Image: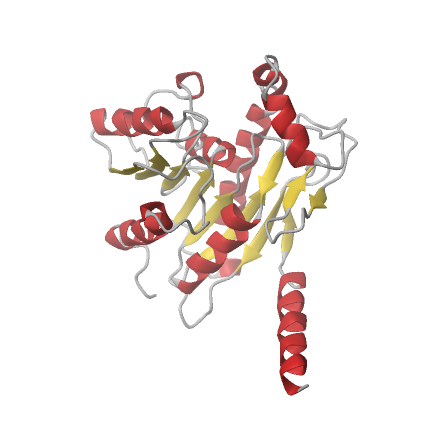
Amino acid sequence: MNKIIVIAFLLLTSFSTTAQQKVIQLYNGAAPGSEQWAYNEQVYKPGTKDGLVYNVSHPTLTVYPADPSKANGTAVIVCPGGAFYILAIVHEGTDVAHWLNEKGVTVFILKYRLGHSLTDNPGQELSDNMKKSDFDKKIAPVIPLCIADGRAAIEYVRAHAAEYGINPAQVGIMGFSAGGTVAASTAFNYTPENRPDFVAPIYAYMPPSLQGPVPDDAPPLFVAAATDDGLGLASHSVDLYSKWLAAKKPAEIHIYEKGDHGFGMHKQNIPTDTWIDRFGDWLGLLGYLKAK
């Protein structure tokens, strides 16, 4: 009986902690460019811990503050992936946030705008849509809005740095797959207000059409992907790294033989399980994990 009570207490505590996360509306009123979108954010839980967020029309940031005893002033905006239709909010979102929190990093999970899912099973709907020849055309109008949300997120976090105990010169962004598109795109054509201090696209979708010239003050770049990426996106990571290398800008790349697409924080008992440790090493090398 005592064991049951303890388990119940831990579950309630976990729920309470989640419920208390601060959620910030990224824009005042409707998001620019999607003012007529009438759908509302929903969560699909397919019987596993990896719930999916879909139908986001009002982008938000959810704050995961670092423990004050560990906080080092660094912030990372985390952009989960999902082909611009869903967000893999756990293994590419909250699991990443908790890991970074342990390193003293304050995390802001970005729920950027998504294409409209028409069913109550967004994962299956996305899988079906990706098999259609017109899928790229369907997502094309959404991508610039997602990227705009990434830029707005950086600008918000930097402008409110003091409120969250953040150094405004230590605001980075990372993303996975489509979220990697959002993250990587912020490394081009930025302003002083929305320039990321470091960028980490993980198995990102980043074709040449979404890239531009490497800026003179380009932020340090960390990329990771798997050679056997089922969507064939490993070359996107290599191309991005090669551009930084040619421009003589700071960059680090990890291409794993196996891992497929979407490995995130999933444990597969292969080397991709430790990519997050390499990311932590890189942040430390850049001085972003030093105690205040």
Q: Is residue 159 visible?
A: no
Q: How is the image coloured?
A: secondary structure
Q: How many marks?
A: 0
Q: Of all residues shown, which one is farthest toward the bottom?
A: 2
The percent position of residue 166, horizontal first and vertical second, equals 44, 57
- Answer yes or no: is residue 118 visible: yes
Q: Is 156 situated left or right of 119 in this image?
A: left
For the C terminus, the image quarter is bottom left
Q: Give the image quarter of residue 82.
A: top right
Query: 258 or 85: nearer the eye?
Result: 258
User: Who's the residue at 61% across and 16% down the image?
Assistant: 132
Instruction: Indicate the quadrant containing the N terminus: top left, top right, bottom left or bottom right.
Output: bottom right
Residue at the spot 45% in from the left edge and 45% down from the top edge: 264
* Residue drawn at x 35%, y 35% as measured from the top left: 226
Tell me where residue 198 appears, x and y as whole percent: 36, 42
Q: Give the image location of residue 2, x and y in percent.
A: 65, 87
Tell me if 230 is positioned left or right of 87 in this view.
Answer: left
Note whether 137 is above or below 235 in the view shown.
above
In the rendered image, the vertical position of residue 215 relative to residue 208, given as above or below: below
Q: Quadrant of residue 99?
A: bottom left
Residue drawn at x 47%, y 63% is 66
Residue 196 picture location, percent across and down: 41, 40
Name the quadrant containing residue 101. bottom left
* Front-most of residues 16 and 37: 16
Q: Residue furthest right?
A: 38
